[in-house]
Image: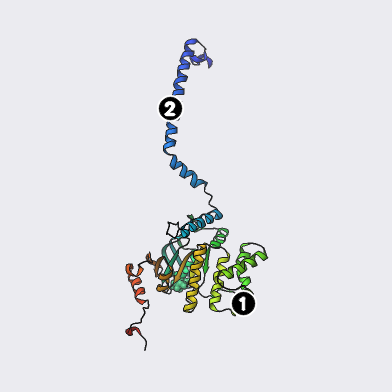
């Protein structure tokens, strides 16, 4: 029988009862000590657990991320001082190759971007400068998720978006808008300005038809044009006005990062200066982060806080724009600096 060999406390004798109570006391003392130890450990590790819980509780959906960044940005701007801001869009070791297959012989491989690392923060302008064919536009298209990358990774608010699904990429493109070089080519000549501006909202399914029209009017006024232009076609606008419409279209989706790919190179100097002033005003009001791409180093030094120099698909130098002309080391950057025109023009450089 199992009960025959059962322990003495089951038999109910008085000596066994005493033994039982002493063993229970020992057990409860042991448990008390253990509880005290656990409490002490919890108390010591309090900051660690608190930070873990907070980081887990933080919702990572788009709306709250956006709110947090807007709040952070406002704090940074209102204070009028430079605060530490987190990178919003980061490209890490981005590579992009174009492979042209041919019937005969080896496929032709063009390495347009070769291991570029670049981070963009809200409210900050990063300048990207380089000669024609150095891969600036390709990098811009990759960062705007318009083209898949061949290597490296892209991160948005710390989340890897390199292999974002079609739907995720579509949603992200609202926050990262690209403005193209040629203002006229970038607009559909068959659509009125109003249709051009309301199209992104229609595409993303935002608002009713009347709301979209109201927002188009607001956007066109934000970029310094009048509502009367809404009924016009791109062919009836000047180049400068077309570029303002392009900027307004990019703003319609309420972006956080604007990638400006040589947006003033097709404009005359004064119109280009007006567009730059507009971009800076918009940045101060709404806190957009810019990637300002140009082959004009003087212009880039004027508008950017940090400057990346690109040559043959690689970023060869990355510096703060303050004192850039003194600190630049790479021979290619030095040659770009030497090519910046100075006033008055030395007689030796004048064309007769
Ligand atoms: N779709 C494409 N197919 C093949 N090669 C391309 C394509 N787009 C760009 N390239 C090549 O990539 C290189 C970089 O081009 P691009 O990014 O337009 O330079 P940038 O904007 O600096 O002038 C160039 O050599 C160009 O010929
Ligand atoms: Mg280009």
Disc 2 crowd rating (10 Å Cα; few below 14, some 14-19, many 20+) is few
Q: State how far apart marks 1 and 2 are (Cα).
A: 82 Å
Q: Quadrant of the N terminus?
A: top right
Give whichever of 97, 135 is nearer the camera: 135
The reply to whether the residue tagged 2 has its Cβ within 8 angstroms of ligand 1 is: no
Q: Residue at x 34, y 75 (%)?
A: 338
Q: Which residue is mark 2?
A: 33
Question: Residue 233 shows which numbered tag?
Answer: 1
Say which residue appears at 50% left-offset and 73% top-offset: 275
Q: Which mark is residue 216?
A: none
Q: How many marks?
A: 2
User: Percent from the top left, x then y, of residue 247?
Assistant: 54, 70
* Callout 1: SS: loop
Residue 311 position in % (x across, y down): 39, 70
Q: Is residue 149 above or below residue 234?
A: above
Q: Residue furthest top?
A: 14
Q: Is residue 107 visible?
A: no
Q: Is residue 61 left or right of residue 113?
A: right
| Residue 279, placed above or below residue 51 | below
Q: Residues within 10 Å of mark 1 (few under 14, many from 20)?
A: some
Q: Residue 15 at x, y = what percent?
A: 47, 11
């Amino acid at each position: 029988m199992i009960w025959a060999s059962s322990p003495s406390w089951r038999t109910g004798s008085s000596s066994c009862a005493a033994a039982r109570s002493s063993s229970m006391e020992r057990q409860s003392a042991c448990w008390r000590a253990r509880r005290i130890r656990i409490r002490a450990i919890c108390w010591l590790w309090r900051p660690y657990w608190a930070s873990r819980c907070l980081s887990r509780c933080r919702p990572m959906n788009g709306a709250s991320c956006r709110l947090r960044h807007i709040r952070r940005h406002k704090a940074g701007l209102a204070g009028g001082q430079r605060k530490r801001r987190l990178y919003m869009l980061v490209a890490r070791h981005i590579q992009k190759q174009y492979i042209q297959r041919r019937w005969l012989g080896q496929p032709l491989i063009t390495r347009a971007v070769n291991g570029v690392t670049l981070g963009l923060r809200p409210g900050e302008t990063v300048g990207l400068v380089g000669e024609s064919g150095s891969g600036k536009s390709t990098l811009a298209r990759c960062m705007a998720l318009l083209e898949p990358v061949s290597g490296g990774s892209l991160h948005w608010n710390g989340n890897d978006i390199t292999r974002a699904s079609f739907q995720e990429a579509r949603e992200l493109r609202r926050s990262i808008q690209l403005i193209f070089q040629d203002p006229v080519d970038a607009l559909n000549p068959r659509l009125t300005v109003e249709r051009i501006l309301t199209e992104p909202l229609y595409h993303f399914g935002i608002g009713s038809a009347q709301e979209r029209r109201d927002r188009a009017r607001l956007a066109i006024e934000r970029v310094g044009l009048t509502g009367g232009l809404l009924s016009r076609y791109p062919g009836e606008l000047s180049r400068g006005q077309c570029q303002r419409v392009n900027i307004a279209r990019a703003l319609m989706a309420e972006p956080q990062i604007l990638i400006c790919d040589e947006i003033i190179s097709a404009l005359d100097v004064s119109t280009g200066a007006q567009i730059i002033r507009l971009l800076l005003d918009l940045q101060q009001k709404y806190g957009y982060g810019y990637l300002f791409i140009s082959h004009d180093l003087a212009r880039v030094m004027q508008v950017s806080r940090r400057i990346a120099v690109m040559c043959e698909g690689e970023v060869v130098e990355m510096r703060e724009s303050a004192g850039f002309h003194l600190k630049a080391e790479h021979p290619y950057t030095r040659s770009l600096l030497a090519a910046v025109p100075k006033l008055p023009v030395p007689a030796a450089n004048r064309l007769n």
